[in-house]
Image (cartoon, rainbow, N blue to C red):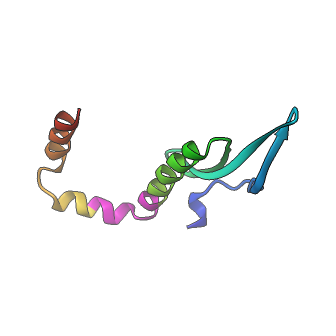
Amino acid sequence: MSYLIKKRPVPPSTNKGVTTRNIEQGSYPALVDRGDFCDLEVFDDLEEARKQQALGLRRLFALGNKDTLKALQKQLPGIRELGLLYVLISG
């Protein structure tokens, strides 16, 4: 599955963080959804890194299982309508 991740150097991860102008900031690497591929990015906010990591993992799974997901979608009648109803109810 390595073809799904854009080839570039992996950013260093550190518990100490990055010091900028004598202010220490955390650095949190996360897998980011880029549509047709996933990428690694470093965030200074832990919650944003967690959110992006979840989205990136979801995309990575979808990219690696395209055929299976297509077959499942065809087998679920009314899935699109169900999704629209969910949006109306939760909105």
In which quadrant will I find the N terminus? bottom right
Q: Residue at x 50, y 47 (%)?
A: 51
Task: Using the rendered image of the protein, determine whether residue 36 is visible from the camera's viewpoint.
Answer: no
Please determine whether, in this image, residue 65 is positioned above or below residue 41: below
Name the magenta segment's main secondary structure.
helix
Left or right of 79 on screen, residue 29: right
Furthest residue to the right?
22
Q: Residue at x 61, y 52 (%)?
A: 30
Q: Residue at x 49, y 45 (%)?
A: 35
Please determine whether, in this image, residue 27 is positioned above or below residue 60: above
Question: In the image, is residue 64 part of the stretch drawn in magenta?
Answer: yes
In which quadrant will I find the C terminus? top left
Task: Using the rendered image of the protein, determine whether residue 50 is visible from the camera's viewpoint.
Answer: yes
Q: Position of residue 72 (x, y in %)?
A: 24, 63
Q: Position of residue 85 (x, y in %)?
A: 14, 39
Q: Position of residue 33 (x, y in %)?
A: 52, 47
Left or right of 7 on screen, residue 1: left
Q: Position of residue 28 (x, y in %)?
A: 67, 50
Q: Over which residues does the magenta segment extend? A: 61-70
Q: Residue at x 56, y 52 (%)?
A: 38
Please determine whether, in this image, residue 42 is positioned above or below residue 58: above
Furthest residue to the left?
77
Question: In the image, is residue 35 part of the stretch drawn in magenta?
Answer: no
Left or right of 70 on screen, residue 59: right
